Amino acid sequence: MASEQDTDLFIVDNSYSGWTGLRYLEEWTGIADAFDIATGYFDIGSLLSLDGKWQRLDKIRILMGVETTSRTKAIIRKAAEDQAVAVLDQSLEEEKGPNPFLDGVPAIAQALRSGQIEVRVYDKDKFHAKAYITHSRLEVVGSQALVGSSNFTRPGLTKNVELNIRVEASNDVEDLQRWFEEHWQEAEEATGLMLGAIERHTRLFTPFEVYAKALHEYFRGHQVTATEWDEGESKMF
């Protein structure tokens, strides 16, 4: 549902007949030069859903949190980093089903290397905020924000029933930007962690690894006979 009433309230809730968070961000990539994103969780599907569009932006900053009940700061940081990588690993594995060659992922890796995309993990406390601050290239348009319940994940932007409100008053957006900057400065750098996780899934495989994977897929759920095993060995050598 998307609605604009006398109060100019604009709701984005991922309804199939109306607006989704993804559509909102897609439209903004056409006029924005930067996104600042606060999210409880991040998965690779969010950027893959924007493939071909997020590349128009000069900068994307992703400030994320993870669930943790650890107490000491050192343990919280390690738990946060480990879980952030685990969530990304899982999302990459899930992407390999419909997208086995992970099309679009190398571009994300390159953006992480170049600094076009930066990622930080907020580890001082449980971080569950969701906000998308979009900075227009045109001063006359100004910055806007979407604030609500959508995580920067594919389901959060496309399928889950969410409730997000557009914020466009300049004073309100400035307040949100100050909030983002304060938490960004307190967060831990995680761009390298994200890049490392992605590179593990996109590295070039040796011919033997490709062949072994092909055998695994071919014989999945199948009891290999002695003849098949011998044929496999002869092909290898």
Image (cartoon, helix red, strand yellow):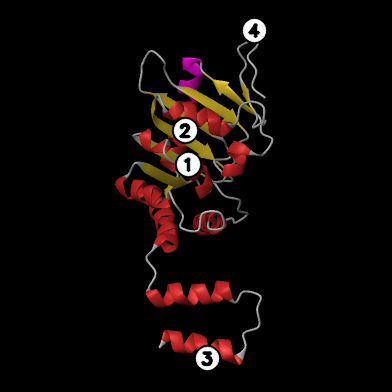
The residue that disc 1 covers is 63
Cα separation between marks 4 and 2: 29 Å
Q: Counting residues from the N terminus, which is met first, the one under dot 3 or under dot 4? A: 4
Element at badge 3? helix
Tell me the mark number nearer the camera, choosing from 4 and 1.
Answer: 4
Residue named by callout 3: 230
Q: State the mark number for residue 180.
A: 2
What amino acid does circle 3 point to?
A: Asp
Q: Earlier in the sequence, mark 4 or mark 2?
A: 4
Contact? badges 2 and 1 (CB < 8 Å): yes
Residue 140's disc number: none
SS of the residue under disc 4: loop
Residue positioned most to the top = 6
Mark nearer the N terminus (3 vs 1): 1
Residue at point 57%, 28% (across, down): 147
In terms of secondary structure, where does tag 1 sit? Answer: strand
Q: Residues within 10 Å of mark 2 (few under 14, many from 20)?
A: some
Q: Amino acid at mark 1?
A: Leu
Disc 3/disc 1 C-alpha distance (Å): 53 Å
